[in-house]
Image (cartoon, rainbow, N blue to C red):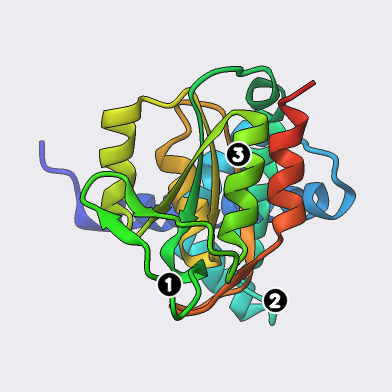
Amino acid sequence: MQIPYEYLGKVFVFLSILAFCATGLALLIGAYSFKKHRIIFPNFILFMLYLFYSPARWTCRRFRIRDTLVDDILIEIRNASMLERFIHTKERRVVLLPQCMRHPECKARCDPVHGYECKRCGKCDIAKICEAGDRYNFEIFVIPGGSFVKKIFKEYRPKACLGVACYNELAEDMQEVAFIPVQGVLLLKDGCFNTEANVEEIIQKMEMCDV
């Protein structure tokens, strides 16, 4: 029995409308959770916004809302849902920093597996984060690109991860390593060169694990 193309078209339109409504609902609930810092239906929001990430950003632009709100929601919910597990993980904890945080005159050597080896010259904020890592038992990695994340996870096998990145990367990276407790911190000033991060927030997240 051959199914009419008209019927298939109606099913496709129905499913598209259903997906659009579900994505819109996830955005509304996520925006409320983000604003009130009260997480509601986290698994539903994460599933829908990761599945329909591009349509969700398009919807925000369509209604004159900044499309980075989608990333804000994903990062906030992931942080909240994994915070307790992150805090109570006491071994093999890592911080992944983007190489763009380095000072323009940085002389650090780039290891083919571990990334840039900070010399702690004090010219950028990475030295402060490395010193905090020593205090709170976190291994700090300054990575040139996403391919190094897989190398580090294969070599070091971390059990908890704190990542620092820009809007374009952080939400996606947190999803990729969500099999372990993860926390994310957005860059204050993004770009590909001489970026800035909230050092106090990064150190505070490490410090929470020391209780």
Q: Left or right: where does residue 115 sit relative to residue 60?
A: left
Q: Left or right: where does residue 159 sit relative to residue 11?
A: right
Q: Secondary structure at mark 3?
A: helix
Q: Is residue 28 visible?
A: no
Q: Which of the two discs, 2 and 1, sits closer to the camera?
A: 1
The amino acid marked with disc number 1 is: Cys
The amino acid marked with disc number 2 is: Ile
Q: Is residue 105 visible?
A: yes
Residue at (42% x, 64% y) in the render? 99
Circle number at residue 133: 3
The amino acid marked with disc number 3 is: Gly
The percent coordinates of residue 195 (x first, y second) are 56, 74
Residue at (82% x, 52% y) in the render? 32
**Residues at marks 1 and 3, CA–CA distance in whole angstroms:** 20 Å
Between 180 and 20, the residue placed more toward the observer is 180
The percent coordinates of residue 207 (x first, y second) are 75, 34
Residue at (49% x, 54% y) in the render? 97
**Mark 2, residue position:** 65
Circle number at residue 40: none
The percent coordinates of residue 133 (x first, y second) are 60, 39
